Image: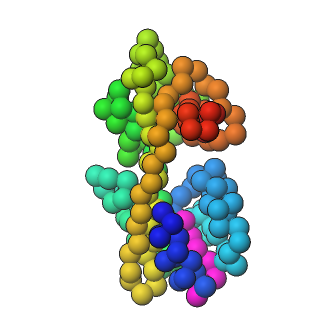
């Protein structure tokens, strides 16, 4: 991901704003924290007044990130696609993480659904990862895309409080905490 940000930072110097194809306030908060040192306005589609119904019909996180970046490219590059893969569930919810068990379903319900699906499954079989693909379509037409993962496992209860989405059930052994 470092190489992606190095390329993007070089081009950001020429930009006054970047629009991210997301409506997720938690993601925007994280993006703003990561890019706080840049002199550029960071906006979600909603904040920029862009009303698009982007069909995420890619088969991978990277494809969906590029689809979203291309949709907002005229206004300013930036998109990501991320989600949770649970090995015991055959990498579900995966690219359907936001739509897992239905549209407009709260993450409290989604998290509980995953916990219910894993009831009785031992810790060593609850391995999971967060996947994040970030894409940008730059004004000159270049496409940048990267993918990173964080490995962990699904806990046996909702425990985390500082994150959003699936963070409250995703445990990161490396940091000894829920994300």
**Which quarter of the rendered picture does the C terminus lie within?**
top right
**Percent x, y of residue 166:** 54, 37
Residue 139 relative to residue 29: left or right: left
For residue 110, say whether it is visible: no
Residue 60 vertical placement versus 7 (above, below): above
Q: Nearer the viewer, residue 111 or 56?
A: 111
Q: How is the image coloured?
A: rainbow
Residue 99, x across and y down, in percent: 43, 41
Question: Could you tell me which residue is drawn at 70 percent across and 39 percent down?
Answer: 162
- Residue that sits furthest to the left in the current view: 59
Figure check: 63 above or below 149: below
Q: Where 149 sits versus 119, above or below?
A: below
Nearest to the observer: residue 133 or residue 139: 133
Give the residue furthest to the top. 120
State the residue in front, 120 or 50.
120
Does the magenta run of residues contain 26? no
| Residue 161 on image: x %, y % | 69, 34
Going 65% across and 41% down the picture, which residue do you hit? 163
For the image shown, how many numbered marks are present on the structure?
A: 0
- Residue 72 position, x and y percent, is 47, 71
Residue 33 visible in rendering? yes
Q: Please state the extent of the stretch shown in magenta in the rendering.
A: 14-20
Please say whether residue 17 is one of the residues in the magenta stretch: yes
Taking the spot 58% from the left edge, 88% from the top edge, the residue there is 14
Question: Which residue is situated farthest in the front direction here?
Answer: 174
**In this rendering, would 79 be left or right of 141?**
right
Query: What's the residue at 70%, 67% (across, down)?
Result: 36
């Amino acid at each position: 991901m470092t190489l992606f940000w190095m390329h993007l930072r070089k081009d950001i110097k020429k930009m006054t704003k970047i629009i991210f194809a997301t409506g997720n306030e938690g993601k925007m908060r994280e993006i703003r924290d990561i890019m706080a040192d840049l002199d550029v306005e960071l906006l979600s589609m909603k904040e920029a007044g862009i009303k698009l119904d982007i069909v995420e019909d890619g088969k991978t996180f990277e494809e969906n990130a590029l689809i979203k970046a291309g949709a907002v490219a005229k206004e300013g590059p930036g998109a990501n696609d991320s989600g949770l893969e649970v090995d015991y569930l055959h990498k579900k919810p995966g690219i359907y993480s936001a739509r897992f068990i239905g549209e407009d379903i709260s993450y409290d319900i989604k998290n509980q659904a995953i916990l219910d699906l894993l009831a009785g499954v031992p810790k060593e079989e609850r391995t999971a990862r967060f996947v994040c693909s970030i894409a940008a379509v730059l004004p000159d037409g270049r496409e940048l895309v990267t993918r990173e993962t964080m490995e962990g496992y699904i806990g046996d209860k909702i425990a985390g409080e500082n994150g959003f989405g699936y963070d409250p059930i995703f445990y990161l052994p490396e940091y000894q905490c829920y994300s």
